[in-house]
Image (cartoon, rainbow, N blue to C red):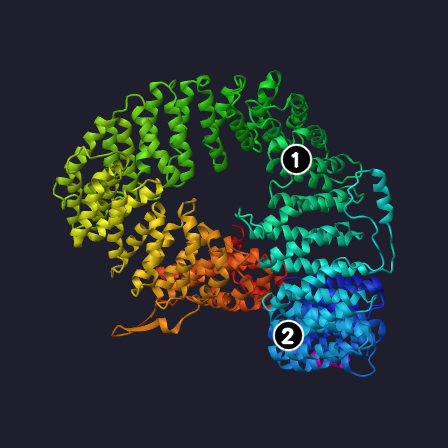
Amino acid sequence: MANNLTITNILEKMTGKDKDYRYMATSDLLNELNKEGFKLDVELEGKLSSTVLQQLDDAAGDVSGLAVKCLAPLAKKVREQQILEMTNRLCDKLLNGKEQHRDIASIALKTIVSEVPSSSIARNVLVSISPKLIKGITAPGMSTEIKCECLDILCDVLHKYGNLMDTDHESLLTSLLPQLSSNQASVRKKTVSCIASLSSSLSDDLLAKATVEVVRLLSNKRSKSEMIRTNIQMIGALSRAVGYRFGPHLGETVPLLINYCTSASENDEELREYSLQALESFLLRCPRDISSYCDEILHLTLEYLSYDPNFTDNMEEDVDEEILEEDEDDESANEYTDDEDVSWKVRRAAAKCLAALVVTRPEMLSKLYEQACPKLIDRFKEREENVKMDVFSTFTELLRQTGNVTKGQTDLNESSPRWLLKQEVPKIVRSLNKQLREKSVKTKVGAFSVLKELVVVLPDCLAEHIGSLIPGIEKALCDKSSTSNLKIEALIFTRLVLASHSPPVFHPHIKAITSPVISAVGERYYKVTADALRVCGELVRVLRPNFEGSTFDFKPYVIPIYNAIMVRLTNQDQDQEVKECAITCMGLVVSTFGDHLHAELSACLPVLVDRMGNEITRLTAVKAFAVIAASPLHLDLSCAIEQVISELTAFLRKANRALRQATLGTLNTLIVAYGDKIGSAAYEVIVMELSTLISDSDLHMTALALELCCTLMADRRSSANVGLTVRSKVLPQALTLVRSSLLQGQALLALQNFFAALVYSANTSFETLLDSLLSTAKPSSQSGGVTKQALFSIAQCVAVLCLAAGDQKCSSTVNMLTDSLKDDSSTNSAKQHLALLCLGEIGRRKDLSSHAHIENIVIESFQSPFEEIKSAASYALGNIAVGNLPKYLPFILDKIDNQQKKQYLLLHSLKEVIVRQSVDNAEFQDSSVDKILHLLFNHCESDEEGVRNVVAECLGKIALIEPGKLVPALKDRISNPAAFTRATVVIAVKYSIVERPEKIDEILSHEISSFLVLIKDKDRHVRRAAVLALSTAAHNKPILIKGLLPELLPLLYDQTIIKKELIRTVDLGPFKHTVDDGLELRKAAFECVDTLLDTCLDQVNPSSFIVPYLQSGLDDHYDVKMPCHLILSKLADKCPSAVLAVLDSLVDPLQKTINFRPKQDAVKQEVDRNEDMIRSALRAIAALNRISGGDYSHKFKNLMGEIGKSQTLWEKYCSIRNE
């Protein structure tokens, strides 16, 4: 506790006559107040407060400055009564005190208001000071300075506590609005900020009142121009403060602003600037309501983009003279300056407004290319540098939006944005070349950033223009006036161009490119050097694109490039980035030009080996050796190979995962290429190290380790000892791995190859291997039974093993497996299960028709009492049929017709056959297709959902094989009266849309709309099927549905709404249970929108979707909220302005989600689900927090504050943010 004596002493000194004493005492007081445990008794509190307030008027400025600093901690330490007294005295001082004390009183008041410890105290402070501030603003006879100070403080108060003052909102608004007509410009300016701060917490009615008043003032044609300017600023400020809530008022305001813009007098540039700024704000914050005015705004911005009444540009625009003398004249012509000319502000506002249009309206892209793009390119010649930068950035936004919207599209029809951009490339390059000849560094940096974005969006568009761009690059890299920033931009652009165009394009210009890049490698600033080295890497690829028959003579460039990099490689005291780039680049040089560097290899390879020994550079060096080893030149690495192998073997033990991963890849490449130089002893050591990396905890690493193991065994030079080491060290790990339920993909393939390689390897008998594999399926005492996934893995390994061992071994294995099926099935289900899966896997890879009646033996297992054995039997039958279709397919079809009870299982067998055929692009005989179709269509209406799904998948996969027959047959059934049939044919279409190009695409593109329109079917099963089909099409082949989205989206959005008629109550006796039949449909609809955002962003109008559809989804059931959080994160990233516009309305559902607590008696599953949901909501909140400008939403700021105060939420939020 603070010592009251100490404080009393300090107070005495604070009132002393000596200025230095007062300063020191105030400084001591500040230190005391900032101590943790500071407390005061009531009497001292009053004394301390009044002394500090007295100090504010101290004649010495530094003393009063310190006194203000004391107020912040003091406001947190004293009682409410004391705070109120202090604020009242300060208000009094502000309104009635001496002029010289007014400033300090204002600062003091702001300090106390911002530091008030709780909202209840804040409310009482506001009740006390608001009337006084209002009086200061409205009372007649108040000086302008007092009014401005009061408005300033009120602005701060409203910004922080506006929502606590809801009862005073109306009176505040009534007092503030008349100030917009004040004769003092400073009062009007402060009033605009004040009303904007107030508006963010106003109700819709009061907001309407404010807007109506401002519009009324604007509509008065007799107003002075400065009043009009203020009111236009007010409208812009209101829109920035309230976001989407301003939408309903655009009808009155937009036409007014456009009218003022066009009718303002010639020298009223500010009026135009403010109007354009307000329109920009509307575009960014009310994207939905502004839609109808976008065309008008576009014409307006294009008109004012070139608005320059005081300057006529007589120069011919398209004369591309390369003469430098003319360049000089050009400079002097552009040197026209007029300090009073502010028309540039209008052009800048127009450029920013156009940028807002580009960012928020992806659907207008094609129109923007036709109308805005030529105008923007023309304005690259803008004479005011700041405006030119805005023109560049607007054009960059246009390019970026093109990239976002057309990602993954190759359709270059004549209205697509990409095609339109391609037509403009010559003009863009010509215009930017002029800019690259300018003197200004800033201009050149801007031009390069536009070129960079252009190459990213259209990678091969500059092939014909390389020659004209080279002088600009040379000048940027070699000119004495160039800054590091310009050099970096030029180098990054050069690298992107080299990487994205075919090498022959550059061959005529290599000399011009190489020398400036090589000299940049020697630069002092490390970022320039690093980028120059990266360019060298691309240059190496361009110099020698292929090793046979290269017509270009690259030899003169080899040594200069090598020397430049070698200097950087051997230099120790430089930045890590430079070291890494030098190593990577040297790897590329050696692997590409090694046959012309015989003498140099002995110098540079040891340096690279040395870099492997350094912890900072070893990963890069390992990757560089992989590149060198993979070189088709097969260089002589004898001077380094032994050391490299021993270093690499040691790296397999390191904890760094990326290092181990790179090491495995490099070892694999080295052993394939240089196995003869590496001894068997080294192989054994590598195998020992490898064995520890094989586990299901890191499947990617496991796959690499097994691949390396296969490479070691496949090397004919490896001795018998290597095989033994593999058997003793790696095989036990592999047998443990095969039991893992996580095993899949690349790791599973690698494991299969490992077993196949092991059969060929020295003295490993097939029988022992087969036994050990089959015995892994037996339940063990520690880990219990083996999972279904693991049985599939074991079966696949067995099949590969048998095929590798040859026909005789394979045949005996099949006999052994069929014998085990004939045993009594009830005793050993696991053994049978595995036997069936093995037969299926072997049958798929090899015709088993030589084994008589194998199909009957398998079908016997359909009688088993165990579900998993029935399913394995149907899988086995289907796969055996794949091995010999003519024999087994008729057998399956015949059984489906005759055996009702086994239908579901037999359909699964048929599905296996069809899926395999569609993947392998095989053909069925016509007769069997007709038979299959007849059979499948008969089962479309089955009551069992499982049967319908299998039928749909079979139909979809046959459609890939026989589209001409199937699509019309499916289309005939979409009007079938049975809902299940309609749903089944739509799901069949879903299965027929796959990622790879297929012959069905052409037929489907004309017919798909008739299937997808079933989103409005009266049956919910059919609607859901259509939504799933749309989702698959959007993911796999967006081009099929692009044109249909305007019609389909409203139907899709309608499926996201909770439908009361689909909610029913089930009476379970003691309690009632609510069942929501529409839940699955809503979830599917939101997931479909999520996919559409990835592939068809230009068709989705985000602002019409977020409110109300996404907003209601965020407040829906757990299963719906999860996809909605994902959508919100995506929108925050791709369409931030549309999200910002409605941010306030999204906060409540998110807040509700993160604060939800399950009941006390909730089961673990519910608790876990709730945890997942909170994390999912926090992920969306983190994405929202990344949008710049999110801080104008009070609600969102409060939400972030709430998360910051809760320790558990904050920890979760931080871990998510760092993911």
Q: Tag 1's secondary structure?
A: helix
**Is 1004 in front, or is 45?**
1004
Tags 2 and 1 touching, CB below 8 Å: no
Please state the extent of the stretch shown in magenta in the rendering.
129-136
Which residue is tagged 2? 249
Indicate the amino acid at tag 1: Ala
- Tell me the crowding category of disc 1: few under 14, some 14 to 19, or many 20 or more residues within 10 angstroms, Cα based: many
Q: Nearer the viewer, mark 2 or mark 1?
A: 2
Residue 258: x and y in percent read 72, 69
**In the visual, does 1171 lie left or right of 459?**
left
Q: Amino acid at mark 2?
A: His
What SS does tag 2 mark? helix
| Image mark for residue 530 | 1
> Is 135 covered by the magenta stretch?
yes
Give the alpha-carbon distance from disc 2 to disc 1, as whole Å: 53 Å
206 sits left or right of 225 in the view: left
Q: Position of residue 1084 (x, y in %)?
A: 41, 60
User: Is residue 51 or residue 711 the one in the foreground?
Assistant: 711
